[in-house]
Image (tube, grey):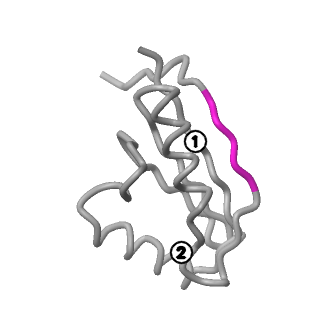
Amino acid sequence: MTEHVRVATFNADAAALDAVLEEINSQEGPPEGVPAKSLLVLADRSAGKAVFVARFGSEEDLKQGSETLDKMSPPTGAMRRISVDTYEVVLDRQAP
């Protein structure tokens, strides 16, 4: 089965990013309706950008998760989504 990722890029100041990370870390797992296998958050604090990469086990899970995530709003006005892209994972090579 092919895995897929959803990559969402945000403009976010440091306080907004910290608030979102705190909220994510306070939860046991992904939000209801988001069957993600993992979440990777990348930040360039000096540029005020954050990238959220959610990994899904199938295209169907990606579609369901995207629908749910698209309905959600960032918890603060200091964070604004600027793009969302989806990809098929064609290679995931780990170091030995």
Residue at 59% across / 83% down in the picture? 76
Q: Position of residue 2 (x, y in %)?
A: 47, 17
Q: In the visual, does 81 lie left or right of 68?
A: right
Reading the chain from its start, which is encountered first: label 2 or label 1? 1
Q: In the visual, does 62 lie left or right of 9?
A: left
Label 2 neighbour load within 10 Å: few <14, some 14-19, many 20+: many
Q: Magenta stretch containing residue 9, yes or no?
A: no
Residue type of the residue flagged with mark 1: Arg
Task: Residue 34: give its label.
Answer: none
Label 1 neighbour load within 10 Å: few <14, some 14-19, many 20+: many
Which residue bears the numbered disc 1? 6
Q: Nearer the viewer, residue 40 or 24?
A: 24
Q: Nearer the viewer, residue 15 or 35?
A: 35
Residue at 67% across / 56% down in the picture? 9
Q: CA distance from mark 2 to mark 1?
A: 18 Å
Q: Position of residue 20 (x, y in %)?
A: 47, 73
Which residue bears the numbered disc 2? 17
Q: Position of residue 62 (x, y in %)?
A: 52, 36
User: Which part of the image, by quadrant, shows the N terminus?
Assistant: top left
Give the overall secondary structure of the magenta segment.
Answer: strand
Q: Point out the residue furthest to the right here.
A: 82
> Marks 2 and 1: CB-CB under 8 Å?
no
18 over 86 or under it: above or below: below
Label 2 residue SS: helix
Q: Report the span colored magenta.
A: 83-87
Residue type of the residue flagged with mark 2: Leu
Q: Point out the residue furthest to the top here.
A: 1
Q: Position of residue 96 (x, y in %)?
A: 30, 22
Task: Nearest to the eye among marks 2 and 1: give it.
Answer: 1
Residue at 67% across / 66% down in the picture? 49
Q: Nearer the viewer, residue 5 or 71?
A: 71
